[in-house]
Amino acid sequence: MDEQEFVGLLSALLEPDTQKVKAATSQLNKTYYTSPASVTALIHIIISHDRPELRQLAAVEARKLVVKHWEAVPEAQKAQLRQQLLESTIAEPKPLPRHSKARVIAAIAKVDLADGQWAELPGMLQQAATSQTVSHREVGIYIIYTLLETMPDMFQENMGPMLALFNRTIQDPESVEVRINTMLALSELVMVLDTEEDTKSLKSFQNTIPHMVKILQSTIEAEDDEHTMQAFDVFNKLLSYESAFLNAHFGDLIQFFMQVAAKTEIDDEVRSQAFSFLMQSVRYRKLKVQSLKVGEQMTRMCLQVATELDELPSEEDEISPARSALGLLDILSESLPPSQVAVPLLKAIGPYVQNSDPSHRRAGILALGMCVEGAPDFIATQLAEILPLVLHLLEDPDTGVRSAALNGVARLADDLAEDMSKEHARLIPALIKNFDLALQGMRNSKAGTKEHELTTHILKASCMAVDSLIEGFEQEDAALYVNELVPRFAMLFDHDDHKVQMAAASAVGAIASASESAFQPYFEKTMQSLGRYIGIKDSEAELELRSIVLDTLGKIASAVGAEAFQQFVQPLMQSSEEGLHLDNQRLKETSYILWSTLARVYEENFEPFLPGVVKALLEALEQEETDAEVQLGAEASDLIGQEVTIAGKKIKVAGANGKNEDDDDDDDAIVQALMEGAEDDDDDWDDLGAVTAVAMEKEIAVEVIGDVLTHAKSKYLPYMQQTIEVVLPLLDHSFEGVRKSAVGTTWRAYACLWGLAEDDGMQKWQPGLPLKVKPTTDLEKLGDLLMKGTLALWEEEMDRATVTDINRNLAATLKLCGPAILAPSATSGTSTPLEQITAIILLLLQKQHPCQKDEDGFDEGEALEEESAEYDWLAIETALEVITALAAALGEQFAQLWKIFETPIMKFASSQERFERSASVGTMGECVESMGAACTPFTQRMMRMFLKRLTDEDPETKSNAAFATGLLCLHSTDAKEVLGNYNTILGTLEPSLQKHSSATPSEHEARLLDNAAGCVSRMIKKAPQNVPLEEVLPRLVELLPLKEDFRENEPVFDMIVSLYQAQNGVIQGLTAQLMPVFEKVLGPPEEQISDETKVKVQQLVQFLHR
């Protein structure tokens, strides 16, 4: 072997000349790296070369080749090589070569120790780790760390002695390096610690946590970035392991990280890391955090830190403590109950929004905006207090505060569209005023100045606030503002800032979508103005604008309808198909969404586009998801906080990764960059998130397929089989968004085929098992397949949103297609689908489903009896929807299942939370309706609960109780219990039957009125002789026709018709008052009464006219 040439080739790898690097790489691979002698040669360079960077590169290369060639190195040489390598590593003055050498030792040890060789190494390392010489201790512990990283099992038998050693070295009095390396080693050792069997070792490990905190505290105080980041990384790792490791000190850790996050004297990057730990803690240990009751303290801390936010919101996603604080608030409100986050926040923001310092006013409204998504139900109940505050801030003299208030409006509207829309008369003028002021300010200020930037931001924020707000408007309300808004926003279509253009175009799309036909006068002109952007593609900014324009034009298509939009469909489809090949993720996804919108508008007439659309969507789903991320891996764990040059680019290494198993590729990034030189362009670095991008594209593509097949109906049939084959396996996808969309699309396919089968003459389903109406063989097979896939996913799914969607899809399918999917099949196994569904629903009601526990289930008992976060409640609320759907599908047979569900549902009906009481009582009512007379055995217990809830303080719960009580009275055959309570029920409902004094009662008041009317009508239908009709009927007639809950018109008019048929004198005496009511209910809107009831009322009217 020509050692001189070998050293020369290695040296060439460090030169900036790309051609030299490529040539040297090729020759090394062909001539040298195929031989075991290369390992010996590399170790000699590691030991003796005077250039530290060459020693490091040789170590990186040797580490990879040891796996291939070490066993073939002559035995006579091995002992000397090991000894020299160990001595050289201990004596190495430079940290980077020293760490790379340590990894070569670990690689050799992995081969040798498995073969029973180098048995003296652990003792030598123990000796080094406890040496009187600091550098020896540093190297000894670092080599132990690299060994633990490579082969942790080796130390499992010596867990006690290892922990004893680490308890000592973590307190090293002289070297922060020893202390940090001990932390790194501990984070690897615990991977093989059995927390249940070896409680002594667990306790010994837990004893190191306070020392770890001290280490982090001291590195922060010393402004030692490199070691600080390594320590943070250890804490983040431990947080991702079993909770037992941190549990004993978890409350103290939360307090410590809160102090670091809040302290303005500490470096921003360090504070952001502390926020990151808190975010992960709340997300993955939420039950523990909830039981510690630190939500309020954390919320107030976030509010304070939010005051540090820059006046001008950054367009970039720069991480700062203030932004992180707002991010933590978002996670807190989603994960913890309102009493720990939203309630204290609303109490705290008063002084903030009234503070003379604009940064406090801004922080108050931004913090409120962050909490809406997590606690929409609670925030909705507080809107009466919140809105005046928001309107006041929209008039604030400070531009930054007004900008934050506009952001607040958008966030409130995103999650409370309906509630916010009721305030349109106050909100829209305030938004227009902000827009006009900003437009004027922008024209009067010089480009590039702070004032110009701020006014431009207000312009965008005004558009975005209208965009979010108007989506929730009724058509007639949206129509009021079309002439005010569209001309204003259209002025910005030609603005020189593409982000302003995007905001304006998007807002016009939202206005069109909400106002529908009222948008018609602006249709042609808007199409001309925006039409020129559907082909732009010269820059990323143009592609972004193009994607927003496509989205807007889709919304305009929905507004003006198929016929008016026809001439634009072809060019729009061409643009969207071209958009798939322009390497812009957002444009790709917008193209898919456009297809979904046009399929909705054109339905079966979308057929000409189906071949191209389906092909593109299925190709998107079949994309490979290779891990294109550059992992800096083990070698880079030495580079924390430093800038390294890779392929000619300076990259700051953000955190220790240091996790590498047997594969050799983890540390290739640096060497690969050194070897391949700098010929790659910047685009390579844009692909770091490629895995996620493809997964997110798949999520949208799957969802769009569901939309297209639902609306194209029979025209989609040629593609149905291939679609199922591609989509069904995605129930196992690693990304929860894809799994969630796949559940929805597969069940929509089933519903579509079911509807087509009914159109072809298949009988309507009837409740109960065994099936009275058998579906087609194809439907049976598909139902069996989907049920199997869904049940397998549903049982184990950790993501709450996915479980919630499974619940919704199963409930919708059962209501639409009946009990067919519940029928046992030849492949059902030991338990039937119905038994499996019942078991999963029971787990959800008991908060024992995997999606309701913390990551490892360790903390599960902590907070189960406490309140739920609203987001958590969704999983239970949708499980209740599955129960009502099961009742509908099974009819009177559901009585057997009610025995299983009764106790947990009754528990929710007695909850402290109004939304839990309301949903559970509504569920009971629906179940009674489906069971019919089979509800009789449960009458007494149900009646007690309903009477209690009829006096509930919450109008929605009271309303649902009235609905449920009426159904129980109608269907139960327990005459003693039912009729015995008639007077109590009527007495309780009497105040609810008063016609409301206000001309416009609230939605809850109107609904309560309607449900009370429905309840009394059902009672009369069941036993007219037990109701004082002379008193009740005139009051009832005054309320008609019902305004809010049209479903309750059914029992009301059914009862009226039956009283006329019985020639009841009281009702006959009210004919004059009833005739205008009949006229109204037979007119628009059509959905006031069902076709069946309409026929009865028409016949009655004809009879009365005789």
Image (cartoon, helix red, strand yellow):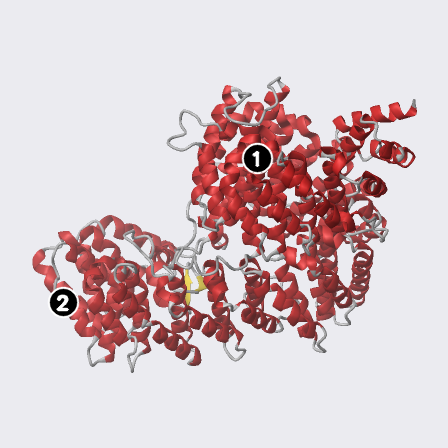
Above or below residue 138? Residue 1034 is above
Residue at the disc numbered 1: 887
Residue at the disc numbered 2: 83
Secondary structure found at label 2: helix
Q: Residue at x 10, y 60 (%)?
A: 77
Counting from the top left corner in percent of width and height, residue 751 is at 58, 29
Identify the mark nearer the N-term, 2 or 1. 2
Quadrant assignment, res 530: top right
Q: CA distance from mark 2 to mark 1?
A: 76 Å
Q: Residues within 10 Å of mark 2 (few under 14, many from 20)?
A: few
Please name whichever residue, 760 or 168, is drawn nearer the observer in this view of the structure.
Answer: 760
User: Mark on residue 210?
Assistant: none
Q: Residue furthest left?
A: 76
Counting from the top left corner in percent of width and height, residue 75 is at 9, 56
Name the image quarter holding the N terminus.
bottom left
Q: Residue at x 67, y 49 (%)?
A: 545
> Viewer-nearest of labels 2 and 1?
1
Name the image quarter holding the C terminus.
top right
Count of labels in the image = 2
Amino acid type indicated by mark 2: Gln
Please name whichever residue, 1036 or 509, is drawn nearer the observer in this view of the structure.
Answer: 1036
Q: Residues within 10 Å of mark 1 (few under 14, many from 20)?
A: many
Counting from the top left corner in percent of width and height, residue 330 is at 58, 61
Residue 992 at least partly seen: yes
Counting from the top left corner in percent of width and height, residue 1020 is at 75, 36
Please name whichever residue, 77 or 846, is drawn nearer the observer in this view of the structure.
Answer: 846
Secondary structure found at label 1: helix
Residue 742 at least partly seen: no
Residues tagged 2 and 1 counted as in contact (Cβ below 8 A): no
Left/right of residue 785 with respect to residue 534 in the rendered view? left
Amino acid type indicated by mark 1: Ala
